[in-house]
Amino acid sequence: MLAAVVLGCFGNPPGVAGVAGTAPAPNVLWTPPPAPALPPPAPPPAVPPDLAARVEELKLADVIDIALRNNTLTSASWAQARAAAASYGAARGQYYPTLSVDGAVTGIKTAPTGGRTAVQQQFYGPTFNLSWLLFDFGGRSGSVGEAREALLAADWTHNATLQGVVLAVAQAYFQYLGTKALLSAQQTTLKEAQTNLDAADERHKVGLATIADVLQAKTALSEAELALESTEGQLQTTRGALALSMGLPANSPYDVEARPDTGLLLGIADSVDTLIGRAVRERPDLAAARATARAAQARVSVARAQALPSLSVGGSDGQTYFFKNSTSGNSYTATLTLDIPLFNGWSQIYNVKAAAASADAAALQAQGLEQQVVYQVFNSYYALRTATQQVRTSADLMASASESERVALGRYRAGAGSLLDLLTAQAALAQARAQDIQARFSWHIALAQLAHDAGVLSLDGGNPLHLQPDTTGTQ
């Protein structure tokens, strides 16, 4: 009966009889309620004004600068660090007394009973309250220590986020540059194929070549055109990926400065053990995991303190004023409280066990991450050595393929060689160019990966690793 009265007074509950809740039948689509008006969309990110003057020749440091300004991951990690700093400040407030002031207005009227006359009073007054925890066997210091370690973990996580963004941008940057270099090389290959076709046509007209030579030259030209078209599409893809890494729309008007390959540093002077030791000391994500483990250990002190006595002091001072007369009164209290927990269903014991187990888990996770860091540095170190060897080998391949193409071209022009030999040599040269470009820019990516894994990748894309020119041919 009561439910019927409530329904009659207030109408149908949500989700019933047309109110937005669920679909009216299992075979009917749910109709959402009218959506509120959305705010106007924010303007898309753009290149900062201080970089707009050289938007067509951005350097790696410029690209990273734009990414760090626009990337939401860095902004979110910074906000989390500021929130942790505020929480740490709030936790430190436990060392100070709690002060408050309250006021009340009271009216009292009693009925005449037992021969007593009715009494009516109205009074008001402020009250000043104080409470101060003096000692709690480490619970307060444990809470503050936990908040401090959480702040350190958030700060280290912010550093790790910055380095991760820098690495992603550097990878996209070198992939885009490598694709541009490959496109330029394939344009050279296309010109060579067109020259071969023109030469084959001329030789066929004067009877020095067969139609088969012309068809072979046309086939080589078509293959070069297909490869060029594919790379042109890949160039737009890598360009859009670089814009995305900078936090810009994919169609943003920009370009990057061409990097010359001269002066490429190939050798790394640091040993793998040196880099592993540096990473174990300086990797921000590993430092964050260790701070998280220390915060979990601090929670054990907090849990233990909940089962131990605490000592606090408190007091209040109040003044009372009456409305209808000029009298007033003062009252105060002072307390020294010793709180001794006796029994609460063993929950305190289990809280300590849970906190200790969580601390062990956090310590083991930090230990596992340290092992992963060692492997990552070890892997990226030898990946860089492999990339170094590939640069050296691709340079040798490029030299031999260029010489082979030069000899084949000379023999063909002299009438001593066939067009097939020339096309084969030029195909090998085109492949050698592509491999040389890929090896060089892969080396830059491998170097950035090693710096990131060692925890030393700087925010301008610089690399503090000790490099040396490859002058000996050995590593």
Image (spheres, grey):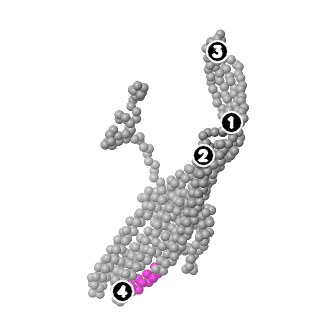
Q: Which of 350 and 312 is in front in this view?
A: 350
Please report the residue visible at 59 percent of the width from the left and 59 percent of the height from the top: 367
Please report the residue visible at 44 percent of the width from the left and 61 percent of the height from the top: 241
Tell me the number on the disc at residue 119: 3
Residue 355 in the image, given as x and y percentages of width and height: 60, 49
Q: Identify which amino acid the numbered label 1 is placed on.
A: Ser
Q: Residues within 10 Å of mark 3 (few under 14, many from 20)?
A: few
Q: Distance between the residues labelled 4 and 3?
A: 127 Å
Please report the residue visible at 35 percent of the width from the left and 34 percent of the height from the top: 17
Residue 71 in the image, given as x and y percentages of width and height: 51, 55
Marks 4 and 1, the one that precedes in the sequence: 1
Please report the residue visible at 37 percent of the width from the left and 76 percent of the height from the top: 191
**From this viewpoint, is residue 240 visible?**
yes
Residue range of the region highlighted in magenta in the rendering: 398-409
What residue does disc 1 label? 131
Closer to the eye: label 4 or 3: 3
Marks 1 and 2, the one that precedes in the sequence: 1
Secondary structure of the residue carrying numbered label 1: strand
Tell me the number on the disc at residue 350: 2
Q: How crowded is mark 2: few (under 14 residues within 10 Å), some or many (20 or more)?
A: few
Secondary structure of the residue carrying numbered label 3: loop
Left/right placement of residue 189 relative to residue 300 reads: left
Closer to the eye: label 4 or 1: 1
Mark 4 and mark 3 residues within 8 Å of each other at the beta carbon: no
Q: Distance between the residues labelled 1 and 3?
A: 35 Å
Q: Identify which amino acid the numbered label 4 is placed on.
A: Tyr
Q: How far apart are marks 1 and 2 (CA)?
A: 29 Å
In this picture, is 233 found above or below 136? Answer: below
Residue 431 in the image, given as x and y percentages of width and height: 41, 76
